[in-house]
Amino acid sequence: MARLFGTDGIRGVANEQLTAALAMSVGQASAEVLTEAQHHRPLFVIGKDTRISSDMLESALAAGICSVGGDVILIGVCPTPAVAYLVPLLGADAGIMISASHNSYEHNGIKIFDSKGYKLPDELEDRIEARIHAGCELKTFEGIGRVTRNEAAILRYIEHVQGCAENNLAGLRILIDCANGSAAVTAEKIFGKFPSDIDIIAETPNGLNINLNCGSTHLDLLAKMVVAGGYDIGIAFDGDADRCLAVNEKGEVIDGDHIMAVVGSEMKKAGKLAGDTIVATVMSNLGFHKFAQANGLNVITAPVGDRYVLEEMKKNGFVLGGEQSGHLIFLENATTGDGQLTAVKFLEILADSGKRASELDAGILQYPQILKNIKVPAALKHTLSEQPSVAEAIAEAEKFLGEGRILVRPSGTEALVRVMVEGLEQGAVESACAHIVAAVEKVNTEFAG
């Protein structure tokens, strides 16, 4: 049986893979496992994004927790990092965020945080999964838990993010894309405090339009509007606002690698970058690594997934890490990736510099990199790169690619295999990628037939 938890919690199409019944079981098992040695009523904080299925899953999770004797605080629509921040502040044992992040509206997900606001390690997720299969003990009479609402708690998170800025971001014209997701309830309040000229788009969620042609995975509209409107920069969040990407005044993308490089350099100059080290992932571009080397920055590479970045940071005392996709972790300010915090940190550097956004990251080259996502059956995705024909195609591609990297890996959140090829010359990168993709698709066809 495939593992229920992926690289970022549990994901699936609502009422197909991720049903209300499963959510109820997750609530029950989480409440038992995360508090089994503490001998008190479990207390959970639950937040959600704007998907049509989030209300359903919120109710199911709350019912599951209450059925085994836990209490629940519902904080409503909020960013994922708000749940992580509020769990210890509200004295809770754990937190749950209902979101499928950057995925389209029909998907949803369950992300679980411990009492300190950190995502769970694999070992705890495995114990929860085992408890789901084994079943839980239902409470009766006064043992049944209660549900309360505290949507005002989000104001404490908003104040926290605002307080992480060391200056007032004055003098910038900023266009913010909320992806019709969680940031729609927080971005105006957070950035409205600063004396900048702020405009916001994609801030009218209707349950179906989250990430729809907007947000950090669809930057075309934001880029066009930034150029046409004469903005200094555009900022884009994803559906649950735990990631941030940007576009400069020319409409060019500033990805997570570039943001980490700029912020990391400034932190190093200020003596605030522990070990002069940034924790990145295997997806970070070769240009990021070359910039880091040239500027005295050390880079440690973790597997894809911001929780693996976090594990490496905690293990060695590093304070900055993240992913090319825009998940950045500022460990002195947050326990998980936070898109709005990332935006505040980057914007204050831009405001202080007196430079254009295109000048701020001008020294960071972007080497040719192609990422292809190929739909595959769930039963095949974890072994596909080991298929003889695919392994042979990878070896052949490496020969004519020359200096560069090839990465073929299963998605941790979807039924996809991701093929990433990076090198010094665009034509070689394209040829290498096409060669591998063809081999993957052939195996796909043979498996289906």
Image: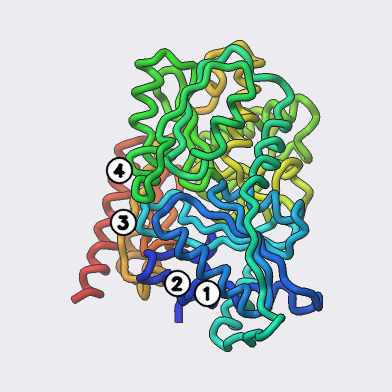
Q: CA distance from mark 4 to mark 1?
A: 46 Å
Mark 4 near mark 1, Cβ–Cβ under 8 Å? no
- Check disc 3 and give the amino acid type: Ile
Mark 2 near mark 3, Cβ–Cβ under 8 Å? no
Q: Is residue 68 above or below residue 106?
A: below
Question: Which of labels 4 and 2 is toward the front?
Answer: 2
Mark 3 near mark 1, Cβ–Cβ under 8 Å? no
Residue 154: mark: none
Q: Residue, x 53% and y 49% (percent of image)?
A: 77
Q: CA distance from mark 4 to mark 2?
A: 43 Å
Q: Earlier in the sequence, mark 2 or mark 3?
A: 2
- Check disc 4 and give the amino acid type: Glu
Q: What residue is pinned by disc 4?
A: 430
Secondary element under disc 2, as helix, strand or loop, is helix
Secondary element under disc 3, as helix, strand or loop, is helix
- Check disc 1 and give the amino acid type: Met
Q: What residue is pinned by disc 2?
A: 20
| Most foreground residue, 29 or 425 | 29
Question: Local crowd at mark 4 within 10 Å, few (<14), some, or many (≥20)?
Answer: some
Question: Which of labels 2 and 3 is toward the front?
Answer: 2
Question: Local crowd at mark 2 within 10 Å, few (<14), some, or many (≥20)?
Answer: many
Q: CA distance from mark 3 to mark 4?
A: 10 Å
Location of the N terminus (image quadrant): bottom left
Residue 24: mark: 1
Q: CA distance from mark 2 to mark 3?
A: 39 Å
Question: Which of labels 3 and 1 is toward the front?
Answer: 1
Mark 1 near mark 2, Cβ–Cβ under 8 Å? yes
- Residue farthest to the front, as pictured: 141
408 left or right, relative to 117: left
Q: What residue is pinned by disc 3?
A: 436
Mark 4 near mark 2, Cβ–Cβ under 8 Å? no
- Check disc 2 and give the amino acid type: Ala
